[in-house]
Amino acid sequence: MSGHSKWSTIKHKKAAQDARRSKVFTRILKEVSVAARLGGGDPTGNPRLRHALSEAKAQNVPGDNIDRAIKKGTGELEGVSYEEVTYEGYGPGGVAVLVETLTDNRNRTVSEVRHLFTKHGGNLGENGCVAWMFHRRGFFAFDRAVLEDSGVDEEALVELALELEAEDFAVEDESYNVYTSVEAFHATKDAIEERGLTATVAQLTMEPQNLVQVDEGGAGPLIRLIDALEDQDDVQNVWANFDLDDELLERLAS
C-alpha cells in the first residue's frame, strides 16, 4: 500500500476528533449536491449519491443540510453550481500530486492551489503532467482488531473478497485492505454493508503506479503541502505517490 493510502487510513481514524468539522461538512455537502445534479436525487438509482450520503451519515452531517444539498443539486432550491476540476503538480522531492476540486470559480481555485504549491516547496504543473502515474480504483480498509472482535478473521474476509470478485487483498499491521475496479466499487460497498461490516475507509482512490521514497528531511514539507491543500475550501481529495517509513508516517500523523 502506498504511503498516501496509509496516510488516508490514518486520517480517517482521526476524523472523529477532527476540529475542522465545518470543512468536513462542506466537502461532503458539495459532493452530495454534485452527485444529485449529475445522477438525480434518488440514491437508489444513483450510486455516487448513495456513497456521498453514506459518508455524510458517518460524519454526522445534519439531515436538513443533506436535504438542502440534494435539492440544490436537482434544482429544487437555488444554489451554487460546482464543476469538477483536477490540478496536477509536484511536491517536495519530486512527488507527483493530484488535487481534485469542486469549484464555482476556476480562477480563484487555481490561484490558491498554485500559491499553496509554491509556498510549500512544490510547483503546479500542466494538465497531464502526472495524471498518467495514477489509476482510479476502489479501496476498502478494515480495522483488524474490530473485525476479529466481531468474529471475522482474515480467511473469512478473503473469502468475501473472492465472492465479490475484488481485484486484490492485502494485509497490513492494523488493517485488511480490499481493492476493486471502479465499476465494482459501489456494488462491493453495498454488499459489505449488507453483511453488517464496517470499513474504516471506503473510497475511490487514485492509486500511484510507482512510488517516490521520501526521507525524514523531505517528509515534513510534503505532509504540510498535502495538509494545506486538503484545508483549501474547494479541494475534495489530494493524491500523491510518496512512500514513507511506517514509524515516520505515524509520528507525522500525531
Image: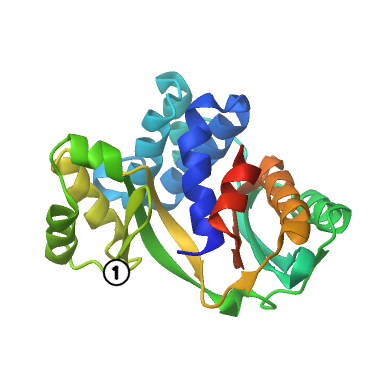
Q: Quadrant for the N terminus, please.
A: bottom left
Check disc 1 and report the residue beneath it: 168
Of residues 155 and 52, the one drawn nearer to the viewer in this rendering? 155
Circle 1: element type: strand
Corner quadrant of residue 123: bottom right
Is residue 29 shown left or right of residue 109? Answer: left
Corner quadrant of residue 162: bottom left
Q: Is the image coloured rainbow, by chain, by secondary structure, or in one colour?
A: rainbow
Is residue 191 shown left or right of residue 14? Answer: left
Residue at point 40% right, 42% down?
52
Position in image of residue 236 (x %, y %): 58, 48
Is residue 49 shown left or right of residue 193? Answer: right
Residue 119 to residue 91: above or below: above
Can you see residue 50? yes
Residue 7 to residue 3: above or below: above
Residue at point 75% right, 64% down?
91
Can you see residue 81? no
Q: Amino acid at mark 1?
A: Asp
Corner quadrant of residue 133: bottom right
